[in-house]
Amino acid sequence: MKEQQSTPLVIIGAGAAGLMAASHAGERGVPALLLERKHRAGSKLLMCGNGRCNLTSTLTADQMLSDFAPTLDAFLRPAITAFSPSQLQNWFERNGLPLMQTRDGKVFPKSERAPDVVRCFTDVLRRYEAPICYNAPVEKIAEQPNGFAIQTRAFRIHADRVLIATGGVSYPKTGSVGDGQKMARELGHKLQPYRPGLVGIEWADPWMKTHMGQEFKGARVRVFDDKRCIGETSGLLECERWGLGGGAISNATRLLSRLNARKPSAEITYAHREPALSISPLKMRPLKEAMVTVGGVDLQDINPDTMGSKRTRNLYFAGEVMDVDGPTGGYNLTAAFATARLAIDAIAAEGSFKPPQSRARPQGKRAARPDRRRKPTRHTNRRRR
Ligand SMILES: Cc1cc2nc3c(=O)[nH]c(=O)nc-3n(C[C@H](O)[C@H](O)[C@H](O)COP(=O)(O)OP(=O)(O)OC[C@H]3O[C@@H](n4cnc5c(N)ncnc54)[C@H](O)[C@@H]3O)c2cc1C
């Protein structure tokens, strides 16, 4: 296999973080090649919010950050304050994706169609003539004196800088299988163990038989580690065939994983009924079904101001490949988009790249599209008459 060309930046993974990174690289004039394992971009994005894609929240950056967890608040603060939920919304609207806000503060595309989000990104990438290579799983990143050799199954390319945006390890069919974490470990980074976040609870109590298929709004879940209460969530409770789901449960399992509960249990109150349902011991559904992976590249190894590695020069991370996870409600996509932007801003600040002003879409306006409709020929006109 011959060593091929060299590029200033390779972005690995065309999911939420990688697509935003490549789009912003276009905006900042950083030449970048986006390499994607699957045959298409944004496979997990397409599943988000049951296919509606909850992009972010109407909360302020501060409000969102305080919901993550203290360590994550500190780590994500530079990224999410630099690209706040309202700036995120402006970015999508400016790039041709009208949005809508729900009463409970969630933000979706107005069409309520996740494919429109992916299309918005691919439109931006086309505008900047940013190359994407599909079916190109990266297998190895080898450090070289002046950058990296990126090895895919089909070719090798040299990059001055690399941004790893390969996602977590849940829903592996979407392409996120832990490659980025493996490559980061090979480059000397520490990994935090994987745990399921935002997942259901298996429960076969007789109560389930009489409530299966029902859902309750405003349920409250208190979570315990060895009988010590370590947190509380509230929201929807759904009774499934295999156990309990819904926002209140998803957020509760994320809390238990993030706080490393050794002997997890929970108490659930719903519809003001007492006594509370008690689930002990508590068993979560498997990681492959989780909406988010808790664990990944250790945040101690990443500079929160640049998303640059503290161990490997010119290596960056964005999104769920890092030990970053949030509650339901647009937090995880917000984190993926904001960390991707911050990484690109840091990369752009280091090099002498020129933003291609002329290609940016004017604020608040849809770009004028050339009229590609075929003009009728004289022949067809004559026939119609
Ligand atoms: C069912 C479901 C619903 C969800 N709904 C929401 C929601 O509504 N709102 C929200 O905020 N969050 C939601 N999430 C979470 C959100 O989807 C993720 O947090 C987010 O997609 C993470 O973005 P990412 O770019 O880090 O990873 P991903 O989106 O997983 O993208 C990683 C990309 O990297 C590619 N890749 C992996 N390895 C390689 C390799 N070796 N070489 C090249 N490419 C590679 C993958 O194929 C993939 O395309 C949901 C998750 C699930 C599973």
Image (cartoon, rainbow, N blue to C red):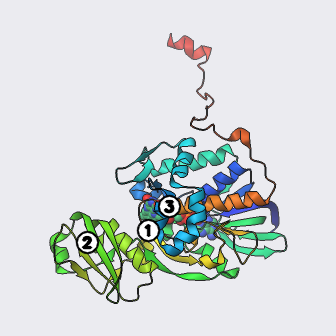
Amino acid residing under circle 2: Arg
Of circles 1 and 2, the one toward us is 1
Give the image location of residue 14, x and y in percent. Answer: 60, 60
Q: Is residue 100 left or right of residue 347?
A: left
Kindly check if marks 1 and 3 are in contact, taking CB atoms under 8 A apart as contact.
Answer: no
- Whether disc 2's CB lies below 8 Å from ligand 1 is answered no
Sequence-wise, the earlier of marks 1 and 3 is: 3
Residue 291 circle label: 1
Mark 3, Cα crowd under 10 Å, few <14 / some 14-19 / many 20+, is some
Does residue 322 appear in this view? yes
Is 268 placed above or below 330 here? below
> From mark 1 to mark 2, how far is it between C-alphas?
19 Å
- Whether disc 1's CB lies below 8 Å from ligand 1 is answered yes
Give the image location of residue 232, x and y in percent. Answer: 34, 74
Give the image location of residue 142, x and y in percent. Answer: 76, 75
Amino acid residing under circle 3: Asp
> From mark 1 to mark 3, how far is it between C-alphas?
23 Å
Image point (43%, 67%), residue name: 327
> From mark 3 to mark 2, how far is it between C-alphas?
38 Å
- Picture quarter with the N terminus: bottom right
Is 62 placed above or below 153 here? above
Image point (72%, 38%), residue name: 358
Q: Quadrant of residue 239?
A: bottom left
Residue for badge 2 = 241
Residue 166 circle label: none
Give the image location of residue 234, x and y in percent. Answer: 31, 67
Sequence-wise, the earlier of marks 1 and 2 is: 2
Residue for badge 3 = 62
Q: Quadrant of residue 351?
A: bottom right
Q: Is residue 258 left or right of residue 177?
A: left
Image point (38%, 76%), residue name: 253
